Structure formats: C-alpha cells, structure tokens
Image: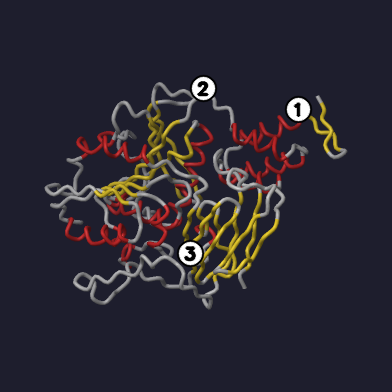
Amino acid sequence: MLAVLSGVDVSAQSVDAAFKRFWEARNPQEAGRAAADIVRSGVTFDEALARLKRGRPYRPDVPRGIVRLSRRSGSQVFYYDLNVPATYDPSRTYQLRVQLHGGVMGQETSQPRGDGSIGEMAGPDEVEQIYLLPCSWKDAPWWTDAQLENLRAILDSVKRTYNIDENRVVLAGVSDGATAAFYVAMRDTTLFASFLPLNGYVMVLANPSVGAEGDLYPNNFRNKPFFIVNGGADALYPRRLIDPYIEHLTNGGVIVDYRPQPTSGHNLSWWPELKEDFEAFVRAYPRDPLPTFLTWENGGDESTNRAHWLVIDRISPTRESRQLFPDLDEFDMSEEQPSSPRLITHMGRYGRVDLWRAGNSVEAHTRGVGAFTLLLSPDAFDFAQPVKVVVDDRVVFEERVRPSLATLMKWAARDNDRTMLFGVELQIEIE
C-alpha cells in the first residue's frame, strides 16, 4: 500500500521495515542509525510518535530466573545479573529495581558476585518485579564516570529485551551501594523514579581519598524522592552522624522518607519489617517523565548536563541570579566540620537552572549558565499554540514551534523510553 505525502510516495512496507530495524537495535548507536532511515522513509511526525508510544514488540522466548550477563567497555568487563520472574509476560510492563552492593573496595577484580540472586533483599512475594544487580570493584567503584556509563548501558540493554515500565525504575543500594545512590542522584537523575540508600552516608563522597569522579551537587537531590534507612548502632554511619544531614535535606525541600533503626548495626536485620514499607514507597512515587518543576546544577560535563527535558549547554561564571532556591550545598555543621560550611566543595565552574512549566509557559531562574536547551514533548506542550520562555524575569522566546521528526527520532534513539518523547529542541541563549 502506498500513501502520498507532499509529493513523495511513502511505502508502508518501507516504514515498517525501518521501524523493525529501530526496535531491533542493540544499543542507542545502532538505534540512531536506524532512526535516520525512519526520517528518510517519509513517515509523518504523528505516525512516528504513535509507533514510539506503542513501543517495540517484546519477544516471549527470553531468559527467566537468574540471568548472568556482562558488558565490555574497552579493556574492562562489567558483570551484572538479572532476576526475572518465571511468570514473566512480555505483554505487560514490570517494575525494575537496580540494586547496588556494598564492600566495593574489598572486591579486588571484576567478577560476578555470589549466585546472582537478589537473595534476602527480595521484596514481598506479591510485588512481581525484575531485579538488576550490577557489579563494582576497587578499580571501578560506583562513584566513577565508568560506572555511570555502565548503568546507562545495561539499563538500556535490559529495556530492549524485557518490557520494563520506564516510570518504575528505582535505584537502591546497601552501604557503599547506598552512598552510590546519592552519587547517581547528584549526577544522573533522569532514568530513575526514586533513590533508596540503605546504611549509607552521603558525606563519604566528600572525602578526597574516596576519589568520587565529577563535581557533585546536592541541589540535584530536589528532583527525586528518597527512602533512607540507617542504624543507631551502626559503627560506620551511626544515626547521630546521619540525622543532621537528613534534617538539612528535608528542610531544603527534598522528599525524604527516613526510617532510622535505633538498635540496628551496619546490617539488614530490619529488612523483614521494612520491606513492605520500602515497596509502598516505590509504588507511591512513580517517575514523572516530564515534570513541571526541574532544577539542575552542572559544571559543563556533557555526560551529566541533563535532567529530563532540561540540558545545560554552556557555563558562564559571570552570570548571577538571586532568585534561586536556597543552595542545599550551604550547610554549616560547626561541631562536625568547623572548617567547611559546604557539604561538598566544587573544584571548577558550575551553573544551575531552576525551571517551572505551566501549560505552554516556562519560567527559568539561572545562575552561572550562558545557554540551555529545553526539550519539548507533545505530551506537555500544545504545538498549535505559542511557547513562552521567561528567563530571570525577561521574556526570551514567545512564538509557535514546529515539531521535527528528526528531533523526535534522535531522542527516542538515545532515551529508549516510550513515555519521554520530544519533538522540539528549543535552544535558549541568555547572553
């Protein structure tokens, strides 16, 4: 069957073939090449959008149970395990928990851990979900760019194989894995609905000897909710050390469900009693893929300069604004840290954008940012009406925008996400 579009014959068969290659792509790079074929096919924006929302056909003959996998990046091999329900049904979506282990520095080499099972950290039987268990070791700890890249890559791979609910992907961790949950929340929030650090401590990342890579920004915690557990008898991270930081984050507007365990040590003795509450928290906070409020701080690193539909393009240290939310990094703990009024010291230049959307209007307050990009979704904006952008009380854009098939496919290839699709890249120059 042929359709005629602007004088061009568009074969439904060729469109189907292009989308088949797109869905069968093994990674974002292959998807990007297939996306170019879709753009050349002449399919309309609306038809492509509808297909992307429907998503790929998932195969029924995929491995179930404990699935042991690995990913190679250069000379490094990153092992990871999946726990897939025996009753996995490709016609329905599944919650996914990424579970980060502790004891990183005691892991000498890259190798699989244990039998690959979630074990005692499994949720209640009635919560049917998939568990993703990556591995870390002393030469590739969780708080490195290599592990951020690894998390993105293996999550992308899992979503290409199993029918994952993109808005119910959570990141949990124990001990070093819990500290890593704070790290990821400060650098790469977009993929996750919530963060659940158990027996961890955010200030570990402020210790130079730990070697946390990249600048870290506590302000970025404001984007997602946290479920936090610490033990009062924990010799490493006792409640008396943790509580002031929890209070600081809560007072700063971060959603925190804090469950201190007064008599527990650095262990999981409390898990049987709290796992129901843990899963209730996950259910209560699905990810909003297109949130009406976003705040993001970044030092110019292109691999971590994005939060959902906001991308910081250029840092400009001379630009200041006094209209931002209070800086969560400003924290004077005179008894604990008399020499440092900041949670984590930044070594380089950085900038921040706070923005709100109401209908087709966006208001942004900035500091230290010279340019940023807004990714506009047809699920959030009415492209038949003008889009208005106000930056630091000045109207910088107010006109209609035209959705682009190339833009739609570019971000669909990168994100592999049926619920977060963009038709317009709106670049905002502030200076």
Q: Quadrant of the C terminus?
A: bottom right
Q: Is residue 404 above or below residue 274?
A: below
Q: For label 3, count other residues whose C-alpha is less than 10 Å away and answer few (under 14), some (14-19) or many (20+).
A: many
Q: Secondary structure at mark 1?
A: helix
Q: Quadrant of the N terminus?
A: top right
- Give residue 366's position: percent from left, percent from top: 51, 68
Numbered mark located on residue 13 in the image: 1
Which quarter of the figure has residue 52?
A: top right
- Give residue 127's position: percent from left, percent from top: 34, 29
Upstream in the sequence, badge 3 or badge 1?
A: 1
- Residues tagged 2 and 3 counted as in contact (Cβ below 8 A): no
Q: Secondary structure at mark 2?
A: loop
Which of discs 2 and 3 lies nearer the camera? The answer is: 3
- Residues tagged 3 and 1 counted as in contact (Cβ below 8 A): no
Q: Is residue 213 above or below residue 60?
A: below
Q: Amino acid type of disc 1?
A: Gln
What residue is rendered at 62% in x and 44% in y? 378
What residue is rendered at 38% in x and 56% in y? 183
Q: CA distance from mark 1 to mark 2?
A: 24 Å
The residue at which mark 2 appears reads as 60
- Give residue 272's position: percent from left, percent from top: 20, 35
Question: 283 left or right of 45?
Answer: left
Q: CA distance from mark 3 to mark 1?
A: 44 Å
The residue at which mark 3 appears reads as 298
Q: Is residue 116 above or below residue 228?
A: above
